[in-house]
Amino acid sequence: MLRWLIGGGREPQGLAEKSPLQTIGEEQTQNPYTELLVLKAHHDIVRFLVQLDDYRFASAGDDGIVVIWNAQTGEKLLELSGHTQKITAVITFPSLESCEEKNQLILTASADRTVIVWDSDTGRQVQRVSCFQSTVKCLTVLKRLDVWLSGGNDLCVWNRKLDLLCKTSHLSDTGISALVEIPKNCVIAAVGKELIIFRLVEPTEGSFEWDIIEVKRLLDHQDNILSLVNVNDQSFVTGSHVGELIIWDVLDWTIQAYERNFWDPSPQLDTQQEIKLCQKPNDISIHHFTCDEENVFAAVGRGLYVYNLQMKRVIACQKTAHDSNVLHIAKLPNRQLISCSEDGSVRIWELREKQQLTAEPVPTGFFNMWGFGRVNKQASQPIKKQQENATLCSLELIGDLIGHSSSVEMFLYFEDHGLVTCSADHLIILWKNGERESGLRSLKLFQKLEENGDLYLASSL
């Protein structure tokens, strides 16, 4: 295994635009990922990683192939070829609890307007669907109903045998960009700047056919929706290209919180740097969300923001977490957050508590979320004073993984096997906990010596 010296230093961006990017030295004492394996199998951009079980994952991208890997050893297990163009969506379809064969299925959609179902254990192509009128951009599985949905210019519902159960009419030429399941047999589809609520109707004694009914359209976003995820059992969150963040009630689909400004141009804050950073639209685009029971973590342009659900406010932010747009984030145990970016880096952050009075103030325009009604300026003064004295958090950089030479599209976290990243440089990197790997190698060595009797001979000398 290759020993990797993680370089924290970066070249300056020049005098014309000095970035406030946080850096870290080579002695990254809190960063466990000190070894790596470079995995080569793809011939184009690798965009997707999907975890299959505790030790396997699948990768897919613009070369149209799917590769299954061993996350522990980095061994390439299977290569699945069947698509003629780039893969646009990947999802797993677990086997039924009552089924004797517990094989995991993989569904892949492609720009060749097909969806293929694969057996992840054998690599066999189980079935292919090629009746689509447009490219399928997203897939989702409704496990309780044992069906899966495909989203393109329309929304289709399929069973496990790949029978088309029902479909909507043509929705939009732009297509469905994201799908999320919500209660009452409903799903939410992001179509351009609209959210469309659909309800699935199961067969009954009076009707033996499935149906999908449009229930409501939510028109509150002003630009295309880029991110859509469930927060918890009560809410889901959406983010748009121009930085609108909306938290919705999952049952009645009303707005719980809403923010459309990501910087405050008020002169007393001396935020010329922030204003400069936010001149381009993609600097405030919300590319990805991840959530836990307390917070929503948002990738906004080049920055990271932590919004506390109970306090209904931002408790931490790194306005320039990367040199380029942040594409993917994930919350880890021990209050850690990982982010990857178009700049080719993967960074590890720790959420730490601090006093607002001793910290850099968070501009009021950042995620200053509100519900219905408007508080007058005089009444808001005590609230503002209370917020300024409240205990907030900071995102402290504890690790900087430099290994890819191009945009890092996403990553997977394995508790026992490390971190997996995929990139536009056609590579996959398996980052390993150096201390853990060293211990495992020592253990294997002692076991081998014991099997050969060498350990006993050495101890008797």
Image: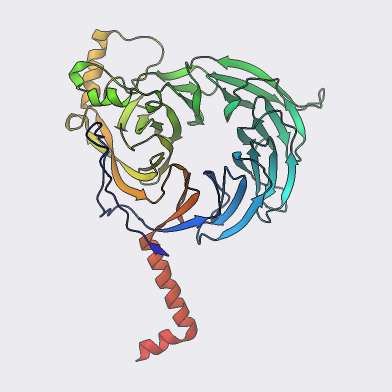
**Total labels drawn:** 0
From the viewer's perspective, is 143 left or right of 334? right
User: Where is the C terminus found, in terms of image quarters?
Assistant: bottom left
Q: How is colour applied across the structure in the image?
A: rainbow
Residue 82 or 73: which is nearer the viewer?
A: 82
Residue 287 or 337: which is nearer the viewer?
A: 287
Please provide percent x and percent y for residue 381: 22, 14
Q: Which residue lies furthest to the bottom in this view?
A: 461
User: Where is the N terminus found, in terms of image quarters?
Assistant: bottom left
Please name the residue shown 24% across and 18% down the image: 384
User: Splitting the image into 4 quarters, where does residue 196 fall?
Assistant: top right
Residue 311 or 224: which is nearer the viewer?
A: 224
| Whether residue 96 is visible | no
Please name the residue shown 54% across and 54% down the image: 54
From the viewer's perspective, is 210 left or right of 173? right
Please provide percent x and percent y for residue 246: 45, 21
| Whether residue 63 is visible | yes
Please provide percent x and percent y for residue 437: 41, 64
User: Splitting the image into 4 quarters, where does residue 458 fall?
Assistant: bottom left
Please name the residue shown 23% across and 16% down the image: 266
Please name the residue shown 26% across and 13% down the image: 380
Residue 183 or 34: which is nearer the viewer?
A: 34
From the viewer's perspective, is 283 left or right of 364? right
Please provide percent x and percent y for residue 22: 26, 40
* 86 is higher (above) or lower (below) than 188: below
